Image (spheres, rainbow, N blue to C red):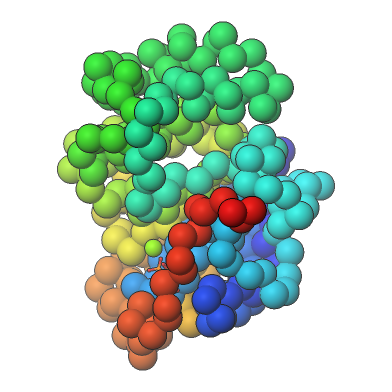
Amino acid sequence: MTHLVVQGLRAAVAGTEILKGVDLAVSSGEVHAVMGPNGSGKSTLSHVLMGRPGYQVTAGSARLDDVDLLALPTWQRAAAGLFLAMQYPVEVPGVRLSEVLEVAAQAAGRDPSTVATLLEREAERIGFDRRLLDRSLNVDLSGGEQKRNETLQLGVLGARIAILDELDSGLDVDGLRTIARRIEAATEEDGLGVLVITHYSRLLEELRPDFVHVLAHGVIQKTGGPELATELEASGYAEWAAETDRADQVEPLADPFADPLS
Ligand code: ADP
Ligand code: MG
C-alpha cells in the first residue's frame, strides 16, 4: 500500500505564489480528480510534485510513503514510483521511447531487457500503432498519439502513483475510453493510485473517481464524490470566479529545462 501525502504545499513561480497550501492524500487503488478553472494551479501542482525546475516550494511537504519527494531530483522521484503524464508532452528528437524506458528501468533497479516485451504488450493493449514505437520521443505524433504514448509509458514503468495532467486533451472519444480502461485496470491489477487533473467531466465518466477536489485560488476549496464533477459540469466554476488569467501577468520562465550549470 502506497500513500502520496501532500500537506500545506505552497509554491511560487516567477515570483508569484500559485499554490497557497494544498492538502491531498492519494493511496494505492484510489482515483482522485483535481478540477478547477484555467490558471488555478493544477499543472503547477503536478510540476511541483514531479520537481520541474523553476518552481519555488515555500512551505509544506510531499511524501511518497517514507520518501520526502521535495528533497529529491525528478529522476529519483520517478524511481520512487511517481509518474507524471504531462499536459504538454515534450518532444525529444533523436531519443527513442524504448531507450528512455530502458534507462528508466535500470535507474529504478529493474531489468532493462524486459522493456521491449512490455512495450509491445502495452502498445497492443491501448491500440498504439507499433510503427510509432520507433520514432523519437513524441516527435511527429498527433495530440492523441502523444497522450496514448504517455499512457504507454505509465504501463511499462509500473509506477505506484500517477499524476495525469489533462490526459483527455487531444484524445477522441474512442481514445479516451481505451485509455481510461487501461488506467482503471492498473488501479485494480497493480494497485496504481491516480491523481487525474482535468476540467471536463467526460474523462471522469469513463474513469470513475473515488474523490473529486476543486482547486481554485491555490487551495483545495471543496472535496466530494463523483457527483461533484457532474455538479461542476452544470454550474461551472462561478463560485470560485475572479480567477484572473494570470498568464498575462506572470513573466514566463526563461527555459525551465536549461542546464542549471550553464
Ligand atoms: P492550470 O493548469 O490550473 O490551468 P497552471 O498551473 O498551468 O494552471 O498555471 C497557474 C498560473 O501560474 C497561471 O497564471 C500561469 O500563467 C502561471 N504559471 C505556471 N507555470 C508557469 C511558468 N513556468 N512560468 C510562468 N508562469 C507560470
Ligand atoms: Mg494545466
Give the image quadrant in which the ligand numbered 2 is located: bottom left
Q: Measuring from the top left, give residue 194's x and y in whole percent.
A: 52, 46
Tell me what residue is drawn at x 41 percent, y 28 percent: 95
Residue in front for this viewpoint, 137 or 78 = 137
Residue nearest the observer in this picture, 44 or 137: 137
Query: What is the residue that sits farthest to the right in this orientation?
Result: 66
Looking at the image, residue 183 lies above or below residue 13:
above
Q: Nearer the viewer, residue 185 or 218?
A: 218
Q: Does the rendering let one see residue 184? A: yes
Q: Is residue 246 left or right of residue 115?
A: left
Is the N terminus in the top left, top right, bottom left or bottom right quadrant?
top right
User: What is the tally of numbered marks visible in this picture?
Assistant: 0
Residue 16, position as x, y percentages in the image:
53, 82
Percent coordinates x, y for residue 239 in the rendering: 37, 86
Q: Is residue 57 left or right of residue 252?
A: right
36 or 30: nearer the viewer? 36
In this picture, is 71 found above or below 147? Answer: below
Q: Quadrant of residue 2?
A: top right
> Residue 206 location in percent, x, y?
32, 45
Most extreme residue toward the bottom is 242
Q: Quadrant of the C terminus?
A: bottom right
User: What residue is drawn where x is 78% and y is 47%?
Assistant: 67
Residue at image coords 54%, 20%: 102
Q: Tell me: 38 left or right of 62.
A: left
Asked if 158 appears above or below 55 in the picture, the reply is above
Q: In the image, what residue occupies the spot 65% across and 58% down?
A: 25
Q: Please state if 23 lies on the left or on the right of 156 as rendered.
A: right
Q: Is residue 219 visible from the viewing direction of this image?
A: no
